[in-house]
Image (cartoon, coloured by chain):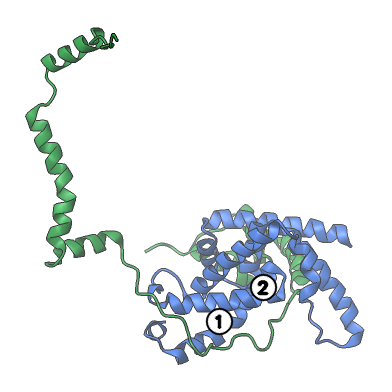
């Protein structure tokens, strides 16, 4: 990041290549909208470029810092969307289609159910689950991104998983 | 040096709470409690049952793996200008005061209200007599002058 802060485009491109897919996947899971997720990735990287000199490696790992930027952007989008359309309704927009026709229907249905169930969680529960479970970030990093204590994070995770289990059991 | 959790015992309640929060995969458990958790799992059939329950939810969660687009991110031809590092306001303020070009101006600006207040206090603007006079004038207002045309 020191090189990036001095305007090194190659170093920035390397960071974008290394961390970009994880950031986009995070935004994709949180927003459940592919186009929005791409916008979040672009804006996260642009912000990282603009504010590279402000990044302090003693305070956060680069991955955590980028996730924090993306998280804030996602929260802004979710707040705007809350008035317009529930997240779960967008679930079918992120189903992939790289599988064989035999398994495609079953996979799509399962993924749609999962996406709907996760989308039905509250924003904080969803964020905690996605950052911890799917992004595999350490609990301290997730707590830092969400601005809460590790204990509070664990409490959110327990409730998120219980709620998710209930939703999935009811839907099957 | 703090003792690691692996050297301490983990309560069954805490172990169940970890499974409820992080799921069944040891890689997702807090690193500091991982060893103690594994040791307790080896000893406790109840905890293993809890882990199996957590694993069934994990296996469902693992099915959701949305893939980002292949193109992901392309570096724009012209990147925006970068910001300078953020300094603490206290550091900025002290540095400005020490600056020979503008320091004296800022110091004078900051201390002028203090000096005015100090001298005002020294003069003792309001005395007992002043208050008495003020009260008298309130109780005995000067009659309004009306014109008699």
User: How far separated are the C-alphas under marks 1 and 2?
Assistant: 17 Å
Chain of the residue on which disc 2 is drawn: A
Q: Nearer the viewer, residue A120 or B132?
A: B132
Element under disc 1? helix
In the picture, the disc for residue A65 is none
- Which residue in the protein does label 1 denote? A19
Q: Residues within 10 Å of mark 1 (few under 14, many from 20)?
A: some
- Residue visible at 13% across and 17% down in the picture: B130
Q: Is residue B140 left or right of residue B30?
A: left
Location of the C terminus of chain B by quadrant is: top left
In the picture, the disc for residue A36 is 2
Residue B56 visible in image: no
Q: Nearer the viewer, residue B45 or A22?
A: A22
User: Image quadrant of residue B49?
Assistant: bottom right
- Residue visible at 11% across and 37% down in the picture: B118
Chain of the residue on which disc 1 is drawn: A
From this viewpoint, which residue is outermost toward the bottom?
A: A10
From this viewpoint, which residue is outermost toward the front?
A: B149
- Residue visible at 90% across and 78% down in the picture: A105
User: Image quadrant of residue A59?
Assistant: bottom left
In the rendered view, would you say B54 is above or below B147? below
Element under disc 2? helix
Percent coordinates x, y for residue B140 in the rendering: 23, 7
Percent coordinates x, y for residue B79 in the rendering: 47, 84
Percent coordinates x, y for residue A86 in the rendering: 75, 60
From this viewpoint, which residue is outermost toward the right?
A: A102
Which hue belongs to chain B?
A: green
Select label 1 or label 2 by which is in front: 2
Q: Which chain did the image draw in blue?
A: A
Q: Nearer the viewer, residue A76 or B132?
A: B132
Location of the N terminus of chain B by quadrant is: bottom left
Question: Mark 1 near mark 2, Cβ–Cβ under 8 Å?
Answer: no
């Amino acid at each position: 990041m020191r090189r990036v802060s001095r305007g090194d485009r190659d170093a920035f491109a390397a960071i974008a290549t290394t961390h970009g897919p994880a950031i986009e996947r995070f935004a994709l899971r949180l927003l459940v909208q592919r186009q929005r997720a791409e916008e979040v990735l672009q804006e996260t990287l642009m912000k990282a470029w603009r504010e590279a000199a402000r990044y302090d490696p003693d305070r956060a790992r680069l991955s955590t810092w980028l996730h924090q930027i993306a998280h804030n952007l996602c929260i802004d989008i979710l707040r705007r969307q809350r008035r317009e359309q529930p997240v779960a309704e967008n679930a079918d927009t992120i189903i992939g289609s790289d599988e064989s026709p035999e398994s495609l229907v079953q996979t799509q249905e399962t993924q749609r159910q999962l996406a709907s169930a996760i989308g039905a969680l509250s924003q904080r529960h969803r964020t905690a689950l996605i950052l911890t479970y799917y992004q595999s970030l350490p609990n301290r990093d997730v707590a830092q991104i969400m601005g809460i204590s590790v204990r509070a994070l664990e409490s959110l995770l327990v409730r998120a998983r219980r709620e998710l289990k209930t939703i999935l059991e009811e839907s099957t | 040096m703090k003792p690691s959790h692996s050297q301490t015992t983990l309560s069954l309640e805490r172990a169940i709470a970890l499974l409820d929060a992080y799921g069944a995969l040891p890689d997702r458990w807090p690193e500091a409690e991982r060893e103690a958790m594994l040791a307790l799992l080896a000893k406790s059939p109840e905890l293993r049952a809890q882990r199996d329950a957590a694993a069934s939810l994990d296996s469902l969660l693992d099915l959701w793996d949305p893939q980002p687009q292949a193109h992901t991110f392309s570096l724009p031809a012209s990147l925006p200008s970068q910001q300078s590092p953020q300094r603490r306001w206290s550091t900025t303020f002290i540095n400005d005061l020490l600056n020979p070009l503008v320091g004296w101006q800022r110091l004078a600006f900051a201390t002028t209200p203090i000096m005015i207040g100090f001298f005002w206090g020294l003069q003792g603007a309001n005395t007992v007599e002043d208050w008495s006079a003020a009260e008298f004038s309130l109780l005995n207002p000067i009659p309004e002058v009306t014109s008699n045309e």
